[in-house]
Image (tube, rainbow, N blue to C red):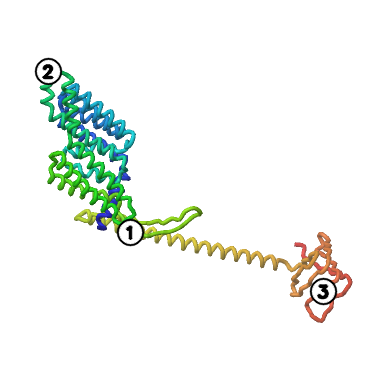
Amino acid sequence: MTQLLVIREQLKKICGKYEVYLVPVGKFLTALITFLFINGNIGYMEKVAKFPIALILALLCSFLPLNFIIICSAFLSLVHVYALSMECALILGIIYLLMFLLYFRFSPKDTFVVILTPICCMLQIPYAIPLSLGLVGTPASVVSVSCGVVVYHILRYIKESANALSALDADGMMAKFKYLIDGIVGNKEMFVMVIAFAVTVILVYIIRRMNIDYAWTIAIIVGGLADILILLIGDLMYTTNIPIIGVILGSVLAFGVVKVLQFFVFNVDYARTERVQFEDDEYYYFVKAVPKITISTPEVKVKKVSGKSAEKEETSERSRERVTRTVHEQASGNQQRSVGATGATRTAGSSAAAGRTTATRTAGTGVSTGSAGVTRTAGSGTARTATSSAARTGTPGTGTRTVTNAGLKTGATPASKAPTEGIRRTYHLDDK
């Protein structure tokens, strides 16, 4: 089961990724198959019943809306029927007009249903159509199914009556009209099938929307049994000559097809059903939540290992590892050198700053004075502090500097006291 879920998720991803290309291809194939079926069953006009014409029409339909396929199919069938009898083409055109009015009014999105129903009827497997529409469609889909069934039976009747219509050429137009209308109205098999398919669609739709577990499976089973039962009753009442064994086998095949459709469209886990109750200002809400069965798609990496290619891949891997290691080592060396240079710069800067500080502090043995708090170092190691303004006088050329201090304190001897009045000192300096 898990593998099937993985396949489903992968198919969804592929369809979503390539939708731009898949949709035109699907239109082209659907139109081509439809045109080939029409040419093969009622290809009375040989000039039109050729493969190149069907191919061109299918290519044209691949780039146009889906409903254009229905229009082309109706036009192609009218052309073939007109080659057989103008009266048949007129009656068929009126029936097409009435069906198109109903179809475009109630179910314009069920294009594939109108196309696939006649094809499935020709293949004797039409019973999957009403079951599928009951699951994914609406009650209005009855119109599409009925149109498809009517078109199939009318075209089949015209094909079977081709020789009789040719023999009525001498009787005139009214005889042909009467013959065709009597044959269409008296086709009990067509009406029984229309009723059976309509009831099946509505019944399946009602059951699958019920608040019960496994509603879709129950709807498929009940709808299939109801379809078989109505066809059997219609055959007993009107002698429609519907093959009973074919109906049963076709219903079993339809059940399998619809279960596949359910797996892709409505796959839920009823074991984890939750019921929630809440309210607002106006209503109470009772909600039943059934989780969908989902699974994450694993990432698959394919590595080719065979012969020389494996050796080359291993060698290239080793080369990449060596290059990566070398790059890391070079980066580490550059980082260490950068750290060493930064440390050296910091050390040199600190030493230079320290040297400049020392040189500044020890430069000269002269007297440094300041307007407030100046420290001076003399040659004898005596520290003097000037606490007030100092005046320096010097006689140029004589080498004499005179400093006058007001209130000088000496720190050579703790017991000594500085005189309170001004002191005049004279220093003899060299005339260098």
**Residue 325: quarter of image:** bottom left
Q: CA distance from mark 2 to mark 1?
A: 94 Å
Spot occupied by residue 155 in the image (x, y as percentages of width and height): 18, 31
Q: Which residue lies most toward the bottom here?
A: 415
The label shown at residue 352 is none
Q: CA distance from mark 3 to mark 1?
A: 78 Å
Q: Are marks 3 and 1 in contact (CB under 8 Å)?
A: no
**Residue 158: quarter of image:** top left
Give the mark count. Answer: 3
Residue 25 in sight? no
Residue wearing tag 3? 409
The label shown at residue 321 is 1
Residue type marked 3: Lys
Assign a secondary structure to mark 3: strand
Q: Residue at x 22, y 53 (%)?
A: 309
Image quarter (top left, top right, bottom left or bottom right) of the N terminus: bottom left
The label shown at residue 170 is 2
Compared with 278, 120 (above or below) is above
Assign a secondary structure to mark 1: helix
Residue type marked 1: Glu
Q: Are marks 2 and 1 in contact (CB under 8 Å)?
A: no
Q: Is residue 293 left or right of residue 159?
A: right
Q: Residue at x 53, y 64 (%)?
A: 343
Q: Residues within 10 Å of mark 1 (few under 14, many from 20)?
A: few
